[in-house]
Image (cartoon, rainbow, N blue to C red):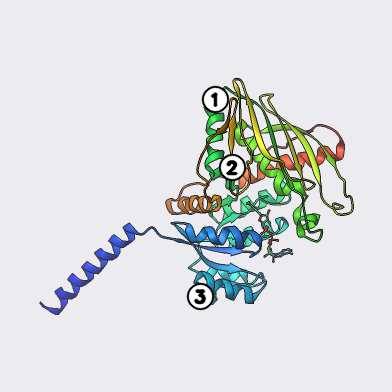
Amino acid sequence: MQRRPFLQTLCGASLATAFAQAQETPKKLGWALVGLGSLSTNQIAPALLKTNNARLAAVVTGSPEKGKQWSEKYGFDASHIYSYENFDKIIDDADVDVVYVVLPNSMHREYVERAAKAGKHVFCEKPMANTPDDCRKMIDACAAAKKLLGIGYRCQFEPHHREAMRLAREKVFGEVKHIQANFGFQSGDPKQWRLRKALAGGGALMDVGVYALQACRYLMGEEPVEVSAIETKTDPVKFAEVDETINWQMKFASGRSAQCTTTYLFNGYNDFTAVCQRGKFGLEPAFGYTGLKGFCSGAKNYLELPNVDHFQLEIEAFSQAIIEGKPFAPSGEEGLRDLLVIDAIYRSIQSGKVEKVATV
Ligand code: NAD
């Protein structure tokens, strides 16, 4: 065989092989984790190992030593370890497609904006930010960079919650008329950032009350327009800066209602009940990482669905939206809508009156 036709054949063959492989092996997007605390360590990094379209490609940490340990454990080069100071250099890192912000709440806005400016898609933990205004700025930054922004509302990908959404949407028990939703736990370490208003933005409501709020919004399928709330405290020293327990009620545009409790005072509240025209359904426990259980009128064991890794599902969904060039939900607007309700709840606690929820 002549040298040139031989090479052409070889090139053609290897191109064809490469093309076939590209067809078979979906591209794994590179994710960078910002903040290597409890959630990143115990949930997100292990979930990234299971995903079919994403991989851990970089980290942003205040500790070079920790960064080195992570690069060795997760198999990426040490050149992909960033500090909070040199994070913007990630713009030149072709291995990173997505930045996942897993920092204290008040820091979400800065790192979402910097990630968008660096030309990366951004996934941000809940609550999206401390104020509606910060949420708007984050949405604008990602829109200006033409990058996707997703919020880590893991329950929206979880099978029990998705089935509950379907029951509500398809009116399987008739229309949902009222919802009760509660989530709280007994908070420990008095020195943690979650009890500092500047970092957390608020207490139990910002941290876990947002799950109860989310459930009410996605089961009702419409937005609350008015709220009324009271805050109670048993330990004004520990909870000097943030809320310990909040009870709030919401009126939706149609006139339907919801009632919620969130707390840092006690364990045992982790559920929702949707009261419908013909009976009721719900989950208890509803919002943990595993072990969710459904119930409905007349049956204790309802919605016996598999337990899955919520983080794996949300990461795969966000990666897939990027790969296919499609929009993603829950988006920044979803995070903003929650912050608008939270803002009205805090205003109601201050004023002692019913407060209107501002519009997007
Ligand atoms: P964490 O305290 O365990 O980790 C926070 C990380 O931020 C640490 O690596 C810490 O070093 C870093 N950090 C950087 N600057 C800091 C500062 N000034 N003060 C404190 N820490 C600083 O917190 P976490 O539990 O991993 O929570 C991080 C985010 O994830 C929060 O927004 C939280 O609401 C959210 N979260 C979501 C879920 C969920 O189920 N989706 C669960 C837990 C936490």
Looking at the image, residue 333 sits to the left or right of residue 264; the answer is left
Which residue is depicted at the point 58% across and 48% down?
Answer: 290
Name the mark on residue 171: 1
In terms of depth relative to the viewer, which is nearer, 50 or 215? 50
Q: Can the viewer see residue 164? A: yes
Q: Is mark 1 within 8 Å of ligand 1?
A: no
Residue 301 coordinates in the image, percent (x, y): 56, 34
Residue 208 coordinates in the image, percent (x, y): 70, 47
Quickly name the residue at label 2: 292
Q: Determine whether the residue tagged by mark 1 lies in a helix, strand or loop.
A: loop
Looking at the image, residue 292 sits to the left or right of residue 7; the answer is right
- Quarter of the figure with the C terminus: top right
Q: Earlier in the sequence, mark 2 or mark 3?
A: 3
Which residue is depicted at the point 62% across and 31% down?
Answer: 220
Q: Amino acid at mark 1?
A: Lys
Q: Determine whether the residue tagged by mark 2 lies in a helix, strand or loop.
A: loop
- Quarter of the figure with the N terminus: bottom left
Residue 22 coordinates in the image, percent (x, y): 33, 61
Q: Does residue 264 sit above or below 296 in this rendering?
A: below
In terms of depth relative to the viewer, which is nearer, 43 or 54? 43
Quickly name the residue at label 3: 77
Mark 2 → mark 3, Cα distance in angstroms? 38 Å
